Amino acid sequence: MATAYHNLSEYDFNSVPNAEAMKFGIVVSEWNFNITGALLKGAVDTLKKHGAKDENILVKTVPGSFELTFGANQMMENCDIDAIIAIGCVIKGDTPHFDYVCMGATQGITELNATGDIPVIYGLITTNTMEQAEDRAGGKLGNKGDECAISAIKMIDFVWSLNK
């Protein structure tokens, strides 16, 4: 669904499971940190709003969005977590670099989801302008970090429901 028709921060609070027993990893890109920092804050605040404990939220940074896949994979292999949220921001410039970074990160996160045992939530914002990124990082379209946190909680619940 196009973000223009949906506020990223709007959801039914009561449809989200309690996250008190859940463990989260968040890997966040340092590049465009004015945006990724706001997305990170949205994700952490929303996790806590649904019961997640501070000690069950592990945050690590990587230099850029292309490195999100490696960071998420290392968390998957080395940390006791139930889901990973990968947060990044790529803003289109004058070269094809945007296409390669977006494609690589997207394919990497998809591969981790297809082959891994825990969900990796796609929190990569890809926009044409800084204004569009700001709109999705707590601006007029809400905060993609909120949406990612809800997805992580629901995906953990999904996995747990299969293992009962």
Image (cartoon, rainbow, N blue to C red):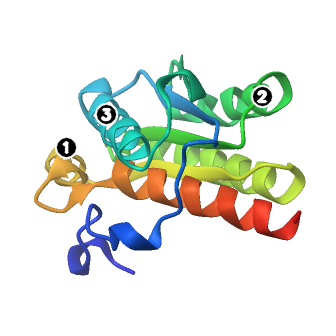
**Res 89 quadrant in image:** top left
Q: Are marks 3 and 1 in contact (CB under 8 Å)?
A: no
- Mark 3 — residue? 41
Secondary structure of the residue carrying tag 3 is helix
Query: Image point 55% across, 43% down: which residue?
Result: 20
- Mark 1 — residue? 130
Which one is closest to the eye, mark 1 or mark 2?
2
Secondary structure of the residue carrying tag 1 is helix
Q: CA distance from mark 2 to mark 3?
A: 22 Å
Query: Image point 23% across, 81% down: which residue?
Result: 5
Q: CA distance from mark 1 to mark 2?
A: 35 Å
Tell me the crowding category of disc 3: few under 14, some 14 to 19, or many 20 or more residues within 10 angstroms, Cα based.
some
Which one is closest to the eye, mark 3 or mark 1?
3
- Residue 109 percent coordinates (x, y): 68, 49
Q: For the residue marked with disc 1, what is the amino acid? A: Met
Tell me the crowding category of disc 2: few under 14, some 14 to 19, or many 20 or more residues within 10 angstroms, Cα based.
few
- Mark 2 — residue? 80
Q: Are marks 1 and 2 in contact (CB under 8 Å)?
A: no
Q: CA distance from mark 3 to mark 1?
A: 18 Å
- Nearer-N-terminus badge (3/1): 3
**Res 3 quadrant in image:** bottom left
Q: For the residue marked with disc 3, what is the amino acid? A: Lys
Tell me the crowding category of disc 1: few under 14, some 14 to 19, or many 20 or more residues within 10 angstroms, Cα based.
some
Give the side of residue 3 with respect to residue 50, left or right: left
Query: Image point 52% across, 34% down: which residue?
Result: 65
Q: For the residue marked with disc 2, what is the amino acid? A: Asp
